[in-house]
Image (cartoon, coloured by chain):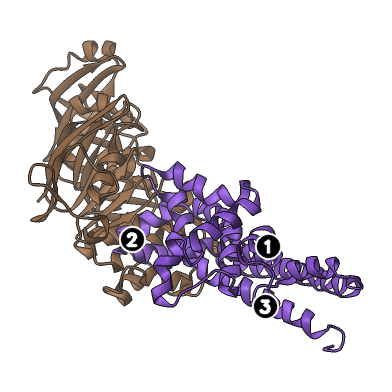
Chain colours: A purple, B brown
Amino acid sequence: MTDWLGPEEWQAVRLSLKVSATAVAASLPLGLLCALALAKGRFPGRQLLNGLVHLPLILPPVVTGYLLLIAFSRQGPLGALLEPFGVSFAFRWTGAALAAAIMAFPLMVRPMRLAFEAVDPGLEQAAATLGASSFKVFATVTLPLALPGVVAGAILAFAKAMGEFGATITFVSNIPGETRTIPTAIYAFLQMPGGEGAALRLVAVSVALAMGALLASEWLSRRVARRVAA
Amino acid sequence: MIRIHVKKRLGAFDLDAMFEAPPGVIALFGRSGSGKTSVINAVAGLLRPDAGRVEIGGALLYDKAARVDVPVHRRRIGYVFQDARLFPHISVAKNLAYGGDHDRDRVIDMLGLPDLLDRRPVALSGGERQRVAIGRALMSHPRLLLMDEPLSALDAERKAEILPWLERLRDEAGLPILYVSHAASEVARLATTVVVMEAGAVKRVGAVSEVLSDPAAVGMIGAQEAGAVVYARIAGLDRIDGLTELALSGGRIVLPGRLGGLGTHLRLRISAQDVILSRERPVGLSALNILSAEVTALDEGPEGVAVGLRCGHDRLLARVTRRSARALRLEPGLQLWAIVKASAVAPQDVGGAA
């Protein structure tokens, strides 16, 4: 099995999994919060938030990547702010995770928002009359009932993060072992004479991972839906 | 005491309802759209009034002027919704325990829930769901229980199944209940105090036997629905003919069926359109129930005349056409005979006394 993929290719696969998992895990709390605010919140600026969340879906990825580069480079406003804390994104794998998280964010928020909207507000009111604070209502009623959508959002975001290319290569370039994820590796192999074999093998891995993620998401959300409804 | 004043503008609808009542079962009675549900939502804190005050047994929950607005989850108001609203993702036992486990064993026993505990809400019938919802509200140890037409989603059979539980609740739990209904029979059976609402305002407040037997209230209650509530004791059982003899303060009446053991106290609703009036004591009539009564009040409405009667210290209500009223020369103080058809009292109109 290990012979089947070269060390460089393995490196790209491992890095892609690490970047995507980090991106999903780190953006999940913010994703939940945004989905909840958009589904239930009534506040000024709600449409603005909605636009902001969806922006990465509309903008060309290269634009998002370039904006990240401006903001998070060592001299950039946010990069300079974070530098003293030892947090750095520019040309690091963490930067790839940040780019992937932002690009995947709309896909994460959308199913979560729909799931939160589908929770009957009457049940939340009932929980409140039984003495539950807003947080308890969320944790014991809203979230469990919306769980299939939350899981679907997380898996969709993971799949998107695995495939992110444009923003990643613009923001953090294509450094083997640091920022060379599967898509950027395929791109690099295709630029190299005799790299078609490696590219094809990574394409196969991509297809397998995507299929796996889809099946896992189907299975998980069906399991969760059964647990919630039965 | 329960003191409630709710002012709220809802689109074109103006709600301005004020009443106070002693603890017991307070029925908020009125047609659909008269503002009953908005009032109890304001009591629960689910609807914020524009102005007003909500005080339950000395606890101030809302007062616009004093800027008091206790959040929903700190009000300790149990709410039994029309559609039960059980949490679908957890078992009956966990639903019950959601708001606390006050008096757990007694509540589960009183509502007949032991066999349901392991089930999921989807596996319950409508009547079972309402019983679980009532138990869940009780176990949260509320200071007041709100019930929003808890029977309206149920068919007659399920209603008959759940009404006795509600009577037990009234008689055993000692908890004030604000009960929303548009069914006079439910109000007659359960309520101690009746608040009649119409177009967002309170038209009448009083004891159930007083309001329901008042001819002037017939217009608000609806001619078909009007009927007095009387208290009775089972004085005799006729097993051969399958009849029960009831002692009222003003005489005896006989009803078909077994309504309970000897000496049991009952309250029953006698529908106004099932009471016939006669100036002379009728003879040779198939109806067995003839009571001596005195006319106390008359109220002429578009559909006829409502006649208030005193019979012992019970009150009855009859409805006659205007022509009959003229022919009988009805006037307050007139002594006459009231004939109650034995089949006039529907089984669901007989309930335990309180």
Residue located beneath label 1 in the image: A164
Classed neighbour count for the residue bearing mark 1: other residues with Cα under 10 Å, few (<14), some (14–19), many (≥20): many
The amino acid at mark 2 is Ser
Label 1 lies in what chain? A
On residue A210, the disc is none
Alpha-carbon span between mark 1 and mark 2: 36 Å
Q: Disc 2 or disc 3, which is closer to the eye?
A: 3
In the current view of this chain or complex, which residue is farthest to the front?
A75
Res. B4 visible in picture:
no
In the rendered image, the quadrant that contains the C terminus of chain A is bottom right
SS of the residue at dot 1?
loop
Q: Position of residue B56 (x, y in %)?
A: 14, 53
CB atoms of marks 2 and 3 within 8 Å: no
On residue A134, the disc is 2
Query: Are the residues flagged by discs 2 and 3 from a single subunit?
Result: yes
Alpha-carbon span between mark 2 and mark 3: 39 Å
Classed neighbour count for the residue bearing mark 3: other residues with Cα under 10 Å, few (<14), some (14–19), many (≥20): many
SS of the residue at dot 3?
helix
Q: Position of residue B74 (x, y in %)?
A: 22, 61
Mark before the other along the chain sequence, 1 or 2: 2
A187 horizontally vs B169: left or right: right
Residue located beneath label 3 in the image: A15
In the rendered image, the quadrant that contains the N terminus of chain A is bottom right
Q: Disc 1 or disc 2, which is closer to the eye?
A: 1
Residue at figure coordinates x 14%, y 25% from the top left: B295
A133 horizontally vs B63: left or right: right
Classed neighbour count for the residue bearing mark 2: other residues with Cα under 10 Å, few (<14), some (14–19), many (≥20): some
Label 3 lies in what chain? A
The amino acid at mark 1 is Glu
Res. B339 visible in picture:
yes
Q: Position of residue B263 (x, y in %)?
A: 22, 60
